[in-house]
Image: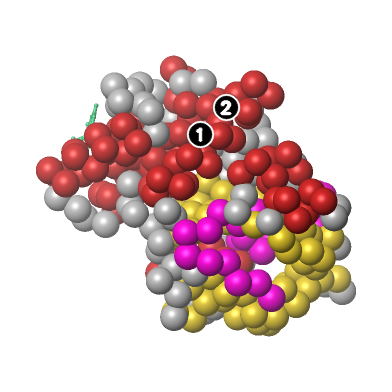
Amino acid sequence: MSDIRLVNLTKTYGEGNAVSEINLNIGEGEFFSLLGPSGCGKSTTLRMIAGFIKPSSGQILIGSDDVTGLPPEKRDIGIVFQNYAIFPHMNVAENIAFGLKLRKRNKNEITWRVTEALKQVGLAGYGERYQRQLSGGEQQRVALARVLVTEPRILLLDEPLSALDKGLREEMKFWIKDLQKNLGITTVYVTHDQDEALTMSDRIGVMSKSKIVQVGTPQEIYERP
Ligand code: ADP
Ligand code: ADP
């Protein structure tokens, strides 16, 4: 199971809470967005789920596992950030193969998985290219392929479209949504863009000043903003 449960999740910096007492259940296979203005605590929440930041209090459960104290590599998650961090000194195939090599998969398996991942993100034939030969959208596809190739239980996306221009953002929005549905992977998507959240999500958690203030389907959120 790969549902996510956040229980009284809190992160305090100095005197203030970046995240206050968040309680949330995200279903297996669900596309869940955290929506809210800059500084409301979305990224901190996502980074706690990823294991990059330790909660001040509360718990994070993935399926039946309490992962609260586990390091990122023990959580079986994939994460993609705004600034597609693909390694410039490696070609696309090597970038995608990176996590598999770390996991000591054999060469045959790596080759077919890289080929499959390239197809999955619509970049068949791009294996030999380098970052400078790719558009922003293509780089984000590589970043996604790089995390999906290891078949994580959970996909975390932190403003993955923010660095792209408007046309590309529109296109990628629908593409990511389709990919997520095809894979059925539990996904948490962080954005300040209401339109993105409404288009892509099964449900949305609206955040304001470190708290979740509303949870609902896009229709529910749209009708009662
Ligand atoms: P969002 O992702 O919604 O823009 P963040 O989660 O990045 O919001 O930040 C939430 C709040 O926590 C902000 O007020 C931010 O300034 C504060 N914050 C985030 N990281 C730190 C940190 N490392 N030290 C101190 N304050 C932080
Ligand atoms: P290695 O470092 O193992 O000699 P490379 O660095 O060239 O191999 O590539 C990394 C991995 O990606 C290898 O396992 C290779 O099989 C695979 N690979 C390389 N190019 C492609 C491609 N165009 N399509 C699919 N897989 C590729």
Q: Residue furthest top?
A: 133
Q: Which residues are magenta?
A: 23-47
Q: Crowdedness of circle 2 by 10 Å Cα count: few (<14), some, many (20+)?
A: few
How far, Cα to Cα, is label 2 from label 1? 6 Å
Amino acid type at circle 1 is Trp
For badge 2, the amino acid type reads Glu
Q: Nearer the viewer, residue 81 or 26?
A: 26
Q: Position of residue 24 (x, y in %)?
A: 65, 72
Q: Residue at x 47, y 26 (%)?
A: 138
Location of residue 64 by image quarter: bottom left
Picture residue at 25% right of the left edge, 49% below the top: 101
Residue 70 visible, this angle: no
Q: Could you say whether the residue bearing mark 2 is in a helix, strand or loop?
A: helix
Is 31 covered by the magenta stretch?
A: yes
Give percent across and percent down for residue 128.
Answer: 30, 23
Between 128 and 140, the one nearer to me in the picture: 140
The colour scheme used to paint the residues is secondary structure
Element carrying mark 1: helix
Dots 2, 1 in contact, CB < 8 A: yes
Q: Position of residue 143 (x, y in %)?
A: 46, 39
* Quadrant housing residue 113: top left
Judge left or right: residue 123 versus residue 52: left
Please give the name of the residue rendered at 41% of the width and 61% of the height, measured from the top-left corner. Answer: 153
Mark 1 lies on residue: 175
Q: Is residue 110 magenta?
A: no
Q: Is residue 196 visible?
A: yes
The answer to whether residue 62 is above or below residue 137 is below
Describe residue 95's horizontal placement relative to residue 193 as left or right.
left
Residue that appears at 52% across and 46% down? 80
- Report the residue marked by disc 2: 171
User: Does residue 222 appear to the left or right of 158 in the view shown?
Assistant: right
Badge 1 local density, few (<14 within 10 Å), some, or many (20+)?
some
